[in-house]
Amino acid sequence: MSGDSPLAGSELSDPVQSLQEAVSAVFGEHGPLAEAAETFCPREGQTRMAQAVARVVAGGGVLVAEAATGVGKTFAYLVPALLSGERVLISTATKTLQDQLFGRDLPALAKSLGLPVRMALLKGRGSYLCLHRLEAAPQAIAHERGLQHALSKIERWAHSTRTGDLAELPGLHENSPVIPLVTSTRENCLGAECPKWRACHVNLARREAMAADVVVVNHHLFFADLAIRESGMAELLPTVRVVIFDEAHQLNETGIQFLGQHLGTAQLLDFSRDLLGAGLQQARGLADWSLLANGVEMAARDMRMAFGANRLSSRLRWVDEMPEGIDPGEWRQTLASLGEALAQAAEGLDNVSEISPDFVRLHERAMLLCERVARFAGACEPGAVRWADVGNQLRLMESPLDIADVVRKRLLGAPAGEEPAEAGQSRAWVFVSATLGDDANLTWFTGPCGLSGAEILRVGSPFDYERQATLYVPRQIVKPNDPAHGAQVAQIAGDAAERLGGRTMVLTTTLRALRVIGEKLAERFEGTRVEVLVQGQLPKRVLMERFRAGNSQGPGQGGSVLVASASFWEGVDLPGDTLQAVVIDKLPFPPPGDPLVEARCRRIEAEGRSAFADYSIPEAAVALKQGAGRLIRRETDTGMLVICDTRLTSMGYGKRLLAALPPMRRLTDEASFHEALEGLVKPDLEAGVTFDV
């Protein structure tokens, strides 16, 4: 791409000035973006961010940029990246955002700029069809008719797909149990020994990435490869000078998942199934494969049952050498039995390792799992924290408290505890998001990510929130810990949905609140045209489709209400009249009983600081900004944000949280709440509504 860059042959000696002038031309009133899109209009904030990105891309360094909703941050970093002519790696938060960037934004921009850019999309192994495992899958599900139809569909698709990306296969649920049977992991991939190595979709995707000008990955893949130095990023990073992280606010929580250790029943059951399938298919009669596989499976199930059948969706602290509430003798015996079952499996595999590379890889997996069992039977690493994720499956976790040291040492190249100096000057690192903190230095993000020496840029939203949106904090609602709180939140949300004809989203901070509010709303709207959608009833994608479809009807035709938690607080784009009311049940403080939260708070207190002021409030502020950001997505949107927590106005820290929100007009009482709803139905936000100054 370098030879085709608009900067090629420039007479300007200063590469920073040259790139910034090219960027200004693109974002100008008569630039290529204005010519390509009728809806484009120059925005001061977008141009300012693009100039900052251009300065770092051309000169090297580290930029952390918070760009509020409406700035147009994607093009603000893409334009200087493409104009620079450099090889660029872009990492996004999710595979969905990856697909959007690769399939829509990048091609559209490259076309507008007239640049012949070679682009590649690179995902983790679990996103691609494994041809070798596809051949073995029928044996693994011989007695599971429910999966055979899905497998047949994949087998037919395998003959026509070029990329092997399972996201291209219509009707395949992302959580389908057939997916692990036809995809590989680092543990079970045979590498160069695989008979399908030359046709491997993962390798083809990596080869395309190595030849591309712009490579789009996701944070999970970036950190997974960074942690294991296995392939992909280990080869790609050294050849790329410009690295951009979009939705960077998720970096720390994503990174710690891959920079620690984990042992889970899902891993163990996958190993057991693969052991049985390979043994019966390639070495029948040379070992009692059913006995060996069953031994691992039963030990894994016993490990889960040690936590009790009724414990679901919880994180348990790790006290001394075991999770809390577990009988010490039973726990030690459980791990010993699991280690013995894995050792027996490893011995059986070692005896047949010469028959097939499958057995060599299975033996390596067995030994790795044995090492993990021994690790969790011993003491936790200093500076890390352990916990147990308990659900239908069980995961034992050990992770660092943040990614600061890893970013300093393995990305920026500085020793632990020292600020990166010259290390970042040649390479450009850009971190962007709509929410990165609630203070001028964005310390919520820069501290845990080891970026305290970075250049900081904050760009406000171009939206006119005073005109477009209102904020209502009900004065009479009970406190969040009152048993009646959920029902009262449902009443307020129901009033909004009834008047607006749906078009309402309720964001909850707990699964318990999700259930209570969902049930109350379902009771209220039973037999009406308003559909109540609750997270967990359907996949997220289907819920969003139903919500959009339900709210695309005219007045009096019904509508949809969505009650959701967790992932719906961010990454949801519902512009126009599709969403006009966002109701948040309470302030989203981090859960006090979470082991990771507790460990971080202890570290802050040990440093002589306040965990509440320096951790809990910034966490709540960022989450609140994310939730509120669902409401106004375009310059023409109007809506109402309702926060059902009086602490926002009665407690001293409420001012700090209010300051983190967009400057919406404040409603004073219930009457003004209903008048504002009427104004959304009949748009006239100036009429008859009183506001706090």
Image (spheres, rainbow, N blue to C red):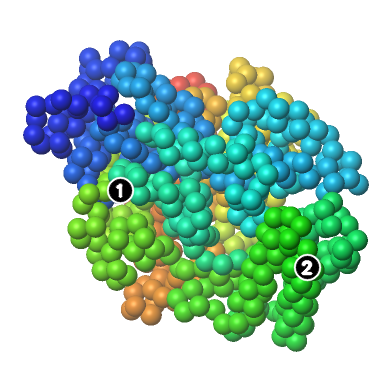
Find residue 530 and report its horizontal and vertical position in percent. Answer: 69, 29
Which residue is located at x 20 percent, y 40 percent? Answer: 58
In space, the residues marked 2 and 1 are separated at their CA atoms by 49 Å
Q: Give the SS element for disc 1.
A: strand
Find residue 655 and report its horizontal and vertical position in percent. Answer: 35, 55
Find residue 488 and report its horizontal and vertical position in percent. Answer: 62, 49
Q: Give the SS element for disc 2.
A: loop
Who is closer to the viewer here, 580 or 75? 75
Residue located beneath label 1 in the image: 429
Which residue is located at x 60 percent, y 21 percent? Answer: 552
> In which quadrant of the rendered view does residue 559 lie?
top right
Find residue 434 and report its horizontal and vertical position in percent. Answer: 38, 43
Q: What type is the residue that disc 1 sits on?
A: Trp
Q: Residues within 10 Å of mark 2 (few under 14, many from 20)?
A: few
Q: Check residue 597 in the rendering and tell me which mark sits there, or answer none.
A: none
Residue located beneath label 2 in the image: 351
In the picture, measured across the screen, residue 437 lies left or right of residue 274, that is left
Q: Which dot, 2 or 1, sits closer to the camera?
A: 2
Q: Specify whether residue 11 is in view.
A: yes
Q: Specify whether residue 469 is in view.
A: no
Which residue is located at x 26 percent, y 48 percent? Answer: 427
> In which quadrant of the rendered view does residue 492 lie?
top right
> In which quadrant of the rendered view does residue 211 lie?
top left
In the picture, measured across the screen, residue 105 lies left or right of residue 481, that is left
